[in-house]
Amino acid sequence: MQRRNFLRLTAMSSGLLVLGPGFWRAAYAAPARPGPSPYGAISGSPDAQGLRLPAGFTSRIIARTGQNVPGTNYTWHLAPDGGACFDTGDGGWVYVSNSEIPLLGGVSAIRFDGGGNTVDAYRILSNTSINCAGGPTPWGTWLSCEEWDLGHVWECDPRSPSQGQRRSALGAFTHEAVAVDPVGQRLYLTEDRPDGRFYRFTPSQWPSLGAGRLEAAKLHGNALDGTASFSWVQVSASRSASLQLARFLTTAFNGGEGCWYDSGTVYFTTKGDNRVWAHTPSTGQVELIYDDDLYPDSPLRGVDNITMSRSGDLFVAEDGGDLQLCLITPGPDRTVAPFLQLDGHSGSELTGPAFSPDGRRLYFSSQRGTDGTTGVTFEVSGPFR
């Protein structure tokens, strides 16, 4: 039997056969299957910025690699990658963006006023290497992750020009993304290598990230039928857990990518097998909420950076594929559908999706643009639910 058919039958039938449909429906939601978007179909032709959007949405370009951010004297960086938005306390917000290039990476920021007008742009981290994704903290800082063998996590202040601080206790490995659980007072981290691990970090004194315990996950059970859970093994912060003795006690995840916390759940993606996972720290439960092998007509390929809207829709950016930003709806009847598509950027990838604090604007980048070099950062506005 082909793998995707086996997985599909497992996801659809295992809980039903053992516990009956009522219990299974109440206790576990099946992985997302292709379905209609809550925003309707995307347009058949691109707008002036090269985006195919649902009806009612508009776009603009807010920055291009090598050019001054409009209205400022700041030159936008190469290879824009992971990003997030931060409230500035005066009605405005800041969008931060990593630069995924060797040696001269770092993080840039664009500041907006309450009307969405650009008022400033500046650097918040310099002289780091291959800054890929990262994650925001509840206390308003940006954690920028270096994606190389001995890469670190850097904590940055997004609200003014500055230089971030290295947080060595979070490990030295091929970092991708990080999510912060303010209830459990822990951080969760992905590692972008075929034998990468999924980590959690417990600060010695919350919320300081200067010291603490780093652990890697061991997966037990079947993540397709709701029986899976994590246990945790302490590891050294000096190098990847895949290179320590702990590799025999922990589980490899194939190319860890985006990571996001929301309402008691940590979501993360693995690009090697094109999956989206959900972990509930309070119970230890682990679910697969998306696997492209289950449905051959699924639109989502090359899972990468993720973020969540106010409605609980999980937005997943594609690295490659047809360059779509897809969404996975919440609830027991999860569906996956395209939200937008980028035309003319075939050698690029979508990166850094993030919503403004009011949830009305979505930011993201085409990392290499139409020419393979010039990154483009977009804003999409419209009736987000």
Image: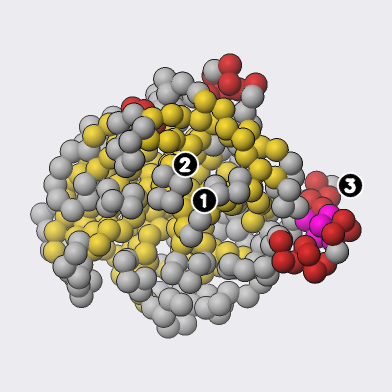
**Residue projecting furthest to the top:** 245
Please report whichever mark, 2 or 1, sits nearer to the chain's N-terminal start: 2
Residue at horizontal 34 percent and vertical 40 percent from the top: 206
Would residue 146 be seen by someone viewing this image from the given angle?
A: no
Q: Which residue is label 2 attached to?
A: 188
Circle 3/circle 2 CB separation < 8 Å: no
The secondary structure type at the circle numbered 1 is: strand
Q: Which residue is mark 1?
A: 266
Contact between marks 2 and 1 (CB within 8 A): the answer is yes
Label annotation for residue 321: none
Question: Which kind of residue does numbered mark 2 sit on?
Answer: Tyr
Label 2, label 1: how far apart the Cα atoms are: 8 Å
Quadrant of the rendered image containing residue 251: top right
Distance between mark 3 and mark 2 Cα atoms: 36 Å
Q: Is residue 292 visible?
A: yes
- Disc number lying in front (3 or 1): 1
Of the numbered discs 3 and 1, the one sitting upstream in the chain is 3
Left or right of 230? Residue 361 is left
Q: Amino acid at mark 3?
A: Met
Percent position (x, y) of residue 82? Answer: 38, 49
Magenta: main secondary structure: helix
* Residues rendered magenta in the picture: 11-16
351 versus 102 height, above or below: below
Residue 12 is covered by the magenta coloring: yes
- Residue 92 vs 198, above or below: the answer is below
For mark 3, give the secondary structure: loop
Percent coordinates x, y for residue 287 in the rendering: 65, 51
Residue visible at 51% across and 30% down?
Answer: 215
Residue corresponding to mark 3: 1
Q: Nearer the viewer, residue 136 or 255?
A: 136
Report the amino acid beneath label 1.
Answer: Val
